[in-house]
Image (cartoon, grey):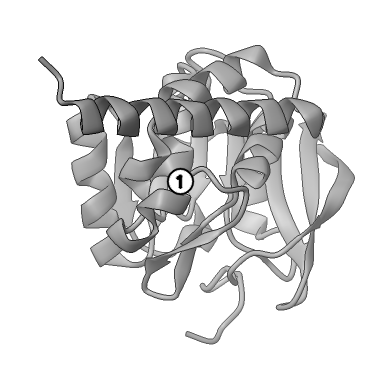
């Protein structure tokens, strides 16, 4: 039999998760498949232990290596803009703790993810294995993409860039969508870029704050 304090803890977490989903609905997230995925995945698994009690707060949290897990609304907004469909091939730049990749995998996407911090990548891979997600991952410079598996139906960049890296644009499939924060080091606008007849149509969605995208085709500082 489950102990009373464990039942209470589980009930509290479920309530927090429901509150998160309700907040996302109120902020305009409409993709039910996305909301179901975010309701199913335990966000506490993807944050460091000292912040576990804040896992469902709508804010970014540190995950080590001067990186963060994005706030739930940012994850939801970017994912909805990506137009995820089952079996679509998605490239993620910036694995972090693995939360975004897990959401994509839960939605049925074929996920490829790149992380430059090998310590974070090792931890994320362990989470993927524990959760049973078949996610391809590697360490390296995400700004040059993953040419061996291109083209991708979608590309999601989880760090702020000065501009859309050309290699990523080239690895986007016809009709595919890239979601990337572009701006300076203080604030970025989310750009949604679609490849149409070898041209790129784009729109902007609000202002966000991301850690910088470091690499050959991103910011150069470490």
Residue lying farthest to the left in this orientation: 1
Q: Position of residue 199 (x, y in %)?
A: 84, 39
Judge whether residue 68 can be spotted in this image: yes
* Viewer-proximal residue among 115 and 215: 115
- Residue at image point 80% right, 49% down: 191
* Viewer-proximal residue among 134 and 220: 134
Q: Which residue is mark 1?
A: 147
Q: Is residue 189 left or right of residue 135?
A: right
- Count of picture labels: 1
Q: Position of residue 132 (x, y in %)?
A: 23, 24
Q: Examine the rendered structure and indicate whether residue 55 appears above or below residue 219.
A: above
Neighbourhood count class around disc 1 (C-alpha, 10 Å): few under 14, some 14–19, many 20 upward = few
Q: Is residue 133 left or right of residue 14?
A: left
Location of residue 5 (image quadrant): top left
Q: Position of residue 67 (x, y in %)?
A: 46, 68
- Residue at image point 19% right, 34% down: 129
Location of residue 99 (image quadrant): top left
Q: Is residue 92 left or right of residue 204?
A: left
Identify the element where label 1 is drawn.
Answer: helix
Q: Is residue 81 left or right of residue 132?
A: right
- Residue at image point 51% right, 34% down: 16
Judge whether residue 176 can be spotted in this image: no
Residue lying farthest to the front in this orientation: 4
Q: Quadrant of the N terminus?
A: top left
Q: Position of residue 127 (x, y in %)?
A: 24, 40
* Viewer-proximal residue among 55 and 133: 55
Q: Examine the rendered structure and indicate whether residue 111 appears above or below residue 121.
A: above
């Amino acid at each position: 039999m489950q102990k009373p304090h464990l039942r209470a803890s589980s009930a509290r977490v479920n309530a927090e998760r429901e509150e998160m989903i309700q907040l996302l609905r109120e902020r305009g997230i409409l993709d039910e498949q996305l909301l179901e995925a975010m309701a199913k995945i335990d966000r506490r698994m993807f944050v460091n232990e000292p912040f576990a009690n804040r896992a469902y707060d709508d804010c970014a949290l540190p995950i080590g290596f001067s990186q963060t897990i994005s706030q739930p609304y940012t994850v939801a907004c970017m994912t909805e803009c990506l137009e995820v469909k089952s079996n679509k091939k998605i490239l993620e730049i910036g694995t972090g703790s693995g939360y975004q990749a897990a959401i994509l995998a839960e939605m049925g996407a074929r996920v490829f993810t790149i992380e430059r911090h090998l310590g974070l990548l090792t931890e994320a891979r362990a989470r993927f294995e524990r959760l049973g997600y078949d996610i391809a991952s590697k360490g390296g410079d995400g700004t040059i993409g993953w040419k061996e598996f291109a083209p991708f139906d979608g590309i999601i960049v989880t760090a702020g860039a000065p501009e859309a890296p050309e290699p990523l644009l080239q690895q986007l499939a016809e009709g595919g969508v890239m979601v990337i924060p572009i701006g300076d080091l203080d604030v970025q606008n989310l750009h949604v870029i679609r490849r149409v007849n070898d041209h790129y149509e784009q729109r902007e969605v609000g202002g966000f704050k991301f850690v910088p995208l470091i690499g050959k085709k991103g910011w150069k500082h470490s």
